[in-house]
Image: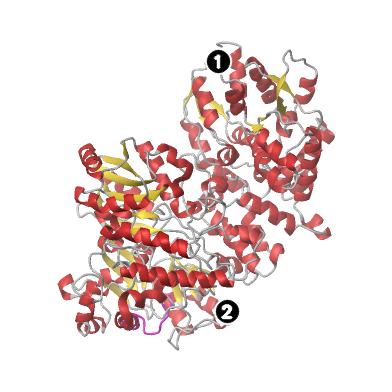
Amino acid sequence: MRRRTGHPCVVGTDERVAGRGGELAAELRSAVAGDVDFGTSARALATMDASNYRRVPAGTVAPRDADDVAAALEVCRRHGVPVVARGAGTSIGGQATGTGVVLDLTRHMNGLVSVDPAARTAVVAPGLVLGRLREAVRPYGLTFGPDPSTHSRCTLGGMIGNNACGAHSVAWGTTADNVRSLDVVTYRGERLTLGTGGQGAPPGLLDLVDRNLALLRTGYPPGLPRRISGYALDALLPERGTDVVRSFVGAEGTLGVVTEATVRLVPLPAEPVLVVLGYADETAAADAAAGLLPYGPLTVEGMAADLVGPAAAGLPRGGAWLFCEADGAGAARDLVRAADALDAAVVRDPAGQRALWRIREDAAGTATRMPGGGEAWPGWEDCAVPPARLGAYLREFRALLAEYGLRGTPYGHFGDGCVHVRVDFDLWTGGGVRDFRRFSEAVADLVVAHGGSLSGEHGDGKARAELLPRMYGDGLVALFGAVKDVWDPDGGMNPGMLVRPEPLDSGLRFEGLPLVGVGREAARCVGVAKCRVAGPSRGDAVMCPSFRATGEERHSTRGRARLLHEMALGEVITDGWRSEEVREALDLCLSCKGCRSDCPVGVDMAAYKAEFLSRHYAGPAGWWRRPRSHWTMGGLPHWLDLFGRGTNALTRLPFAARLAGVTPARPLPRVAARTFTSWFAERASSRPPALTLWPDTFTDHLAPETGTAAVRVLEAAGLGVTLPEGRVCCGLTYVSTGRLGAARRVMRRTLDVRGGADDPVVVLEPSCAATLRTDLPELLPDDPRAARLAASVLTFAEALETLAPHWTPPRLDRPVTGQTHCHQHAVLGDAADRRLRERAGLTGDLEGGCCGLAGNFGFEPGHEEVSLACAEDRLLPALRSAEDRAEVLADGFSCRTQIAHLTDGRARHLAELLAEGLDGPG
C-alpha cells in the first residue's frame, strides 16, 4: 500500500488504479486522438526512469497536442487518477515515474514550432529533443544555452520540469534563465500562459506570496547559482518581476503540464577553444575553479583520475582536470595563465574537442562502474554548494564516504559548485538500504552546513524531497505545500514529488529482484538512455540500431533491459521466461553487441537475448515452438559440414525458404565449389607455423577467397600458417539463436581439438573473433582452456602488426568506403586496422553503425524493413557518396552479403585487397 497524497480525490494505491484500468483506458481512447496503451509492455517500460526508484503506472497516453493533454487530464481527474508527464525518462530522482497515467510527450508533441533569429527565441513542443533544437538553430549562429550531458535524447519539457543546466551554465545559466513563456494545462484543465508581471498566475497564488514576503526574502540561501531544490517561489517577489514562468520551471511536473514553451537562444562562440587544466588532485581542481570565473569561461567542468581511467592518456599531467571552454585563443591563454595548473592542453581542433568532451558526457554512466567491478548508483547525485566552498565540501564529503565504508567518484560542474557522484550503495539488502538513508541524511546536513542546495541540476524527486526541511526549514516547506494546493487542489499532478513526499528509501527498484541472473544484469541499466538517440548514428557508434529504425522504446537497449527487469520481478510481466512481451522486444535486437561498448554501463543485450531465448524455448515443447530459422540458420555450421555444396541444390527446391523458416525476399548464400580447408590441405608451406588461421564456417564454405588471400598476405609477411587439426567452430550461430546448450557442446569440441596449444589464433571473421573473445569464456567459465583460447585470438590486422611489425604492406593508394563490423567495434577494436590501411595507402574512414543483416537476423521473416533501415542509417549513404574508384571494404561476411543484396557493388575483406596488391599495380 502506497502512502496517500493527502488529497481524497486522487487514488493513492496501485491496486485501485489497476482495478479501474479497463474503464479508464476506454474513456481515454474515446477522448484523445493520440495513443493510449494500458498493455503489459507499455506499463513495464514506464516503471523506471534513471533513478533508483520504481512505480508501476496504470497505462500510458501519447497525446498529439494541447487539446489531447487537456482531455486526458479531464478523464484522469474524473477517475481520481494521478498523472505524470514524461520526456526521455532520464530523471535521476524518480520524478518521471508514476502510479497513474504517464503522458509520453516524446511521440507526437516533439516539434520545433518556430524560430525567430532576430529576437533570438524559439517556440518548442515539450517533447522536442534538445539536440534537435540545437541543430536547427545552429545555421543562425545560435544555440540553447543549457546543455546536459544527455542533450542527444533529453527533451525540453523534461529540462523545464527539472530546471536542467549542463556544462555551459557558468555562461548561460539554467533552463529557468532561458525560458521566456510557457503554455501549461493544469489538472483541472485550465490553460494558462505564464510570463512575468504575474502573467498566468492561478487564482490565489499572488495573494499567498503577498502574505509570505518576509519568508520568501530570507528563506533561500544566497550566492548559489545552482539552487534547484524546491519551488523557486522567490521568483514571484515583486522586486524580481513576479516571474510566474521562472517559478514554474523546476516544479517537476507537480503543478501542470507544459504544452509549449518560448525559449531564449544565445550566440554560439565564434572560436570555441577547449582548455584542459591538470591539477594534483580533485580538491586542488575544485579550489581553483572559482578563481577562473572572472575570466569569463563558458565551462568549468571537473573530474578526477578515478573516473577517467585509461582515457587519461590523452589528458595533460595531473590527478584531476578542469575542462574549460573559452571563446577565442586570447581568452584561452588568459585562462591558462590564471589557472596555476600543473599542466595544460589547449585544443582547437573540433574532433579533438569532441573526443575529450565525450569523456565528460559519458561520466553519468561510467561512474556506475567501480574500479573493482562493483556497481555504484545515484542517490546523492547532484548537490551544489557556493563555488568558493567546493574544495572544502569535497574534502568533507570524501571523509563521510570513508566513514560509511562507501566509495564514489565526484565529478561535475565545478565552476557552479555542482557535484555529481554515484556511490556504491548496497540497495539489495535491508541493512544496505538503512545505510543508504543514514548516509543521505548525513550528506544533506553537510550540504546545508556549506550553504548549498540538495539538488544542483536534476531536481529532488523522491531522492531528496523528504530532506528539504533540512535545507529550507518547516515554514518554507509548508509554503511549498500551500503553493502546490493552489495550482493543483486535487493533488493529481505527480503526487509524492517535492510536496508531501514518500520516504526516500521506499519504492527502490531493486526490491524483490533476484541477486543473480539476467534480472540482476539488466538492473545495471541506470536509464541514461544513450541508446535512445534518434537519427543517424555518429562517429563510430553502433548502439542502438533497432531503436533508430523503429523509434520505439521497447526496441532500445534500455527498453529491453527494463522489460527483463520487470520479468525478473514478476509483478507487471507475470509469465517469466515465457513472456511474449519480452520475446517481441528482443526479436528486433540484432545482437550487434554495440551496447557492450557504447552503453556507458556496458549492458550486453546480445548476451541477455541469448540467455532469454535459451530459457524461453527450454523443455520438450520448446523444440516445436522455436522458429525454424533457429534450426537452419542457427545450425549453419553443422548443415554445411553435412551437405557441403549439396546445400545449393537444397536451396533451389520449391518452397525452400519457407521450409527453412527464412524470408524468400533474400537469396540464400551460395556454397563455394571448394572449401578453404580443402585448398589449404593440398598446398605446402615452406615456413614453420607461427600462427593458427581459424577456418570459420563463413570463410571455409562461403568465402574461401578470403582465407586464401589471408594466407598469401601472412606468408608474404614472413609468417608460417597452419590450420587446426580438426573441425573447429566458435559457436556463434548457436549463441545468436539462443541454443546455448548446443553452443557449449560445440565450444567444448573445439577446445578438445585445440588441446593445450597457446599459439596466436588469427580469425578473419569479426563476429567469430568476438565470440571467441567474449562468449566462449563467459559460457564456459570453469574451463581454463576457454580463457586461454580467448586470450590467443588476433584479428588479421592485429596479427600483422604484432607478429610481423617490420613488414611493409603493398601500397594500394586508393580511397576506401564501407563499414567497420559492429562486433569489431564493440569487442575487438579497429585501431590496428586503421593503421594497416594507412600504411597501405588506403584513404578514408569506414562508417560505424550496423549493416542490418547481422547473421540470421536479416534472413528471418518480418525483419526485412528493420534490416533495410539499419543499412540506410550509415552504410548505404556512405556507399552512394563514395568516389567511383573507391574500394568497398567489409571484413564481415554478413556485411558483404548485405551490400551485395542492396547494391550493385562488391565488398571485400582487407586481406583480399592486400593480396591483390602483392601482385603489383594493375
Work out whether residue 680 or residue 283 is closer to the camera in this orientation and state it: 283
Quadrant for the N terminus in the image: bottom right
Tell me the tag on residue 810.
Answer: 1
Residue located beneath label 2 in the image: 18
Is residue 579 positioned above or below 798 on the image?
below
Q: Residue at x 51, y 28 (%)?
A: 834
| Residue 124 can be seen in this image | no
Q: Is residue 46 visible?
A: yes
The residue segment tinted magenta is 483-495
Kindly identify which numbered label has been placed on residue 393. Answer: none
Q: Secondary structure at mark 2?
A: helix
Q: Earlier in the sequence, mark 1 or mark 2?
A: 2
State the CA–CA distance, disc 1 to disc 2. 69 Å
Mark 1 or mark 2, which is nearer to you?
A: 1
Mark 2: amino acid:
Ala
> Horizontal and vertical percent for residue 742?
79, 47
Q: Residue at x 60, y 20 (%)?
A: 804
Mark 2 neighbour class, 10 Å CA radius: few under 14, some 14 to 19, many 20 or more: some
* Residue at 43 percent of width and 41 percent of height: 312
Is residue 484 shown in magenta? yes
Q: Quadrant of residue 594?
A: top right
Residue 701 location, quadrant: top right
Residue 125, position as x, y percentages in the image: 36, 62
Near-viewer residue (369 or 247): 369
Q: Position of residue 894 (x, y in %)?
A: 64, 36
Side of 680 where 830 appears, left or right: left
| SS category of the residue bearing label 1 | loop
